[in-house]
Image: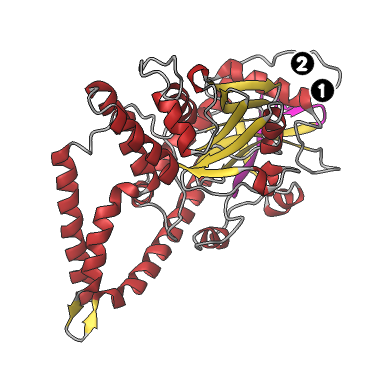
C-alpha cells in the first residue's frame, strides 16, 4: 500500500508541475471554454469550419485557408478562388448537412459529430445529395476518426465515406493555417484558442504529461518497477468509475420521480415494458460492459419514463400512441434527453418519423413553442436536447474522464439534468395543447 501511495504521490507532483506550466503560459485560459461553447457543434465547430475556408470570410485572407483545407483532404482545387461553403444546409424536410463545400464541379459534404447521435440513413441521404455533382465526397468528422455504423450508412458502403478526425486532420489543418497568418496577431491568436480547445477535447493537450508519467512508470523501486503497480491501479480506477456512474443513474432515476408537489408524475418503464419497445435500460452490468475498451454497442442505455398528467390524462398520448421521456448516453458518451413515441400496448414498439411524420411534427412543434434548444429531424426521436450542463459519460480509456468522475463524486451532474427535465414538463403542463390539425393524430 505504501508503494502505491508513493507512486500516486509522485504522479501528483508531475501533474501539478504541468498544470503550473500551463497556467504560466496562459494555456488554461480559453475563450471557448469560458463561454461554455466547447462542444457546441453548430455555433462553435461547424461555424468555425464554415468561416475559415470561405474566401469571402471575415478573416480577409481570401482562399488561403480553403486551399490548405483542400490540400489536406485531397480535394481538387480547380475553381478554388470562387469556392462556396455554408453550414446547416437544408436539403430536405428532415435533413440539414453540417457543412457543404463547393469547389468548381466538386461537392464536399461534412457530417460533424462532436456529441450528436447518428440519424437513420443519414450518410446515405447526404451522399445522394452530393452525387449530383461530377466529383463528390462525404466526410464523416469525429474527434478521433471513428467509423460510422450501419444505422447511419443505410445502403451506403463504408468505403464511400471518408473518416476524418479533429485529433489529426483538423488540428493539422489549423497548424497550416496558423503558419500562414503568423504576422496577423489577432487572427493567429483566435485560431490558437480554437486549436487549444481541440487539443483538450481530443486528449492531445496532455501529451507531454503522459510522456513524463511514462518515465515515472519506468523507474525501479528496489527489485520492482513502478509499472508493475499500474494494472492494479487501472482496475481500481475502472471499478470506481463503474460504481460512481451506476450511482449517478440510480440517483437520477429517484430524483426524477420526486414530483409530489407537481400536477404530473413520472413513472419509469419496468424492464419488461422497455424490452418490448425495445429500449436498453441501464443496469450495473451494462455500465460495466460500456467501460470495456473496444466493446461495441456500448452506448444508448438509460432510463425511460411514462408521464401522467393530473389535469389531462391524454396529454402524453397522441393518436393512440404514448409519448415517453427518454434519457440516455448517445454514441459519443454524452448524456441527453428527449421524447420518443411508442406504439399502443397492443403493438408496443418504437415508432419512427418515416412512419408517423404528423405525430413527430406535432410534438416537435409543441416543444419548440415552450422551450428553446430542442432539436428535431431524427427518425426515432420526436425531439431531443442536451442539458444546460453537459454530462460527459464517455470512457474510451476504460473509465470516465477525470473531470466527469469528479462531477459524479461531487454529485453536481444530477442536479442540472433533473432541473432541465422537470422544467420541460412544467412548461408542457403550463401550455395549452396545440390543435393537431390532422385526423391522423386524433
Q: Mark 1 points at which residue?
A: 441
Percent coordinates x, y for residue 216 in the rendering: 21, 68
Query: Does 13 appear above or below 48?
Result: below
Q: Nearer the viewer, residue 355 or 177?
A: 177
Residue 161 place in picture, x, y as percent: 63, 42
Task: Please say if 217 is above or below 40.
Answer: below
- Which corner quadrant holds the N terminus? bottom left
Left or right: 293 in relation to 118 = left
Could you tell me which residue is drawn at 30 percent across and 32 percent down?
178
Q: Compare residues 133 and 166 and report the one nearer the observer.
A: 133
Using the image, tell me which numbered label, if any, was put on residue 436: 2
Residue 274, position in %: x, y?
Answer: 70, 49
Secondary structure beneath disc 1? Answer: loop
Q: Which residue is at the front of the view, 121 or 159? A: 159
Q: Describe residue 87's horizontal placement relative to residue 273 as left or right.
A: left
Callout 2–callout 1 Cβ contact below 8 Å: yes
The front one of 261 and 323 is 323
Colour convention: secondary structure
Amino acid at each position: 500500500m505504501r508503494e502505491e501511495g508513493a507512486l500516486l504521490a509522485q504522479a501528483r507532483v508531475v501533474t501539478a508541475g504541468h498544470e503550473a506550466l500551463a497556467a504560466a503560459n496562459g494555456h488554461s485560459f480559453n475563450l471557448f471554454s469560458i463561454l461554455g461553447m466547447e462542444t457546441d457543434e453548430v455555433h462553435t465547430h461547424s461555424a468555425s469550419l464554415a468561416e475559415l475556408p470561405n474566401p469571402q470570410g471575415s478573416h480577409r485572407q481570401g482562399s488561403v485557408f480553403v486551399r490548405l483545407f483542400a490540400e489536406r483532404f485531397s480535394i481538387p482545387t480547380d475553381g478554388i478562388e470562387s469556392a462556396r461553403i455554408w453550414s446547416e444546409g437544408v436539403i430536405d424536410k428532415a435533413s440539414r448537412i453540417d457543412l457543404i463545400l463547393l469547389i468548381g464541379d466538386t461537392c464536399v459534404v461534412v457530417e460533424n459529430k462532436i456529441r450528436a447521435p447518428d440519424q437513420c440513413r443519414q450518410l446515405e441521404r447526404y451522399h445522394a445529395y452530393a452525387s449530383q455533382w461530377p466529383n463528390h465526397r462525404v466526410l464523416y468528422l469525429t474527434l478521433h476518426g471513428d467509423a460510422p455504423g450501419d444505422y447511419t450508412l443505410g445502403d451506403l458502403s463504408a468505403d464511400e465515406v471518408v473518416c476524418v478526425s479533429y485529433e489529426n486532420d483538423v488540428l493539422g489543418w489549423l497548424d497550416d493555417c496558423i503558419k500562414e497568418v503568423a504576422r496577423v496577431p489577432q487572427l493567429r491568436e483566435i485560431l490558437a484558442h480554437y486549436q487549444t480547445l481541440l487539443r483538450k477535447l481530443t486528449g492531445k493537450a496532455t501529451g507531454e504529461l503522459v510522456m513524463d508519467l511514462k518515465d515515472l512508470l519506468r523507474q525501479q523501486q528496489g527489485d520492482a518497477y513502478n509499472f508493475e503497480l499500474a494494472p492494479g491501479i487501472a482496475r481500481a480506477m475502472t471499478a470506481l468509475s463503474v460504481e460512481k456512474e451506476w450511482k449517478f443513474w440510480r440517483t437520477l432515476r429517484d430524483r426524477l420521480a420526486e414530483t409530489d408537489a407537481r400536477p404530473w408524475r413520472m413513472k419509469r418503464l419496468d424492464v419488461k415494458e422497455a424490452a418490448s419497445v425495445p429500449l436498453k435500460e441501464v443496469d450495473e452490468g451494462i455500465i460495466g460492459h460500456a467501460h470495456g475498451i473496444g466493446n461495441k454497442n456500448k452506448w444508448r442505455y438509460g432510463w425511460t419514463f411514462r408521464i401522467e398528467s393530473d389535469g389531462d390524462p391524454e396529454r402524453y398520448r397522441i393518436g393512440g400512441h404514448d409519448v415517453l421521456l427518454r434519457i440516455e448516453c448517445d454514441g459519443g458518451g454524452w448524456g441527453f434527453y428527449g421524447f420518443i413515441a411508442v406504439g399502443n400496448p397492443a403493438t408496443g414498439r418504437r415508432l419512427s418519423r418515416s412512419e408517423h411524420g404528423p405525430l413527430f411534427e406535432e410534438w416537435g412543434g409543441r416543444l419548440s413553442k415552450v422551450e428553446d434548444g430542442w432539436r428535431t429531424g431524427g427518425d426515432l426521436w420526436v425531439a431531443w436536447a442536451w442539458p444546460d450542463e453537459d454530462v460527459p459519460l464517455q470512457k474510451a480509456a476504460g473509465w470516465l474522464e477525470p473531470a466527469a468522475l469528479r462531477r459524479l463524486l461531487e454529485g453536481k451532474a444530477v442536479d442540472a439534468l433533473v432541473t432541465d427535465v422537470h422544467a420541460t414538463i412544467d412548461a408542457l403542463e403550463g401550455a395549452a395543447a396545440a390543435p393537431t390539425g390532422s385526423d391522423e393524430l386524433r
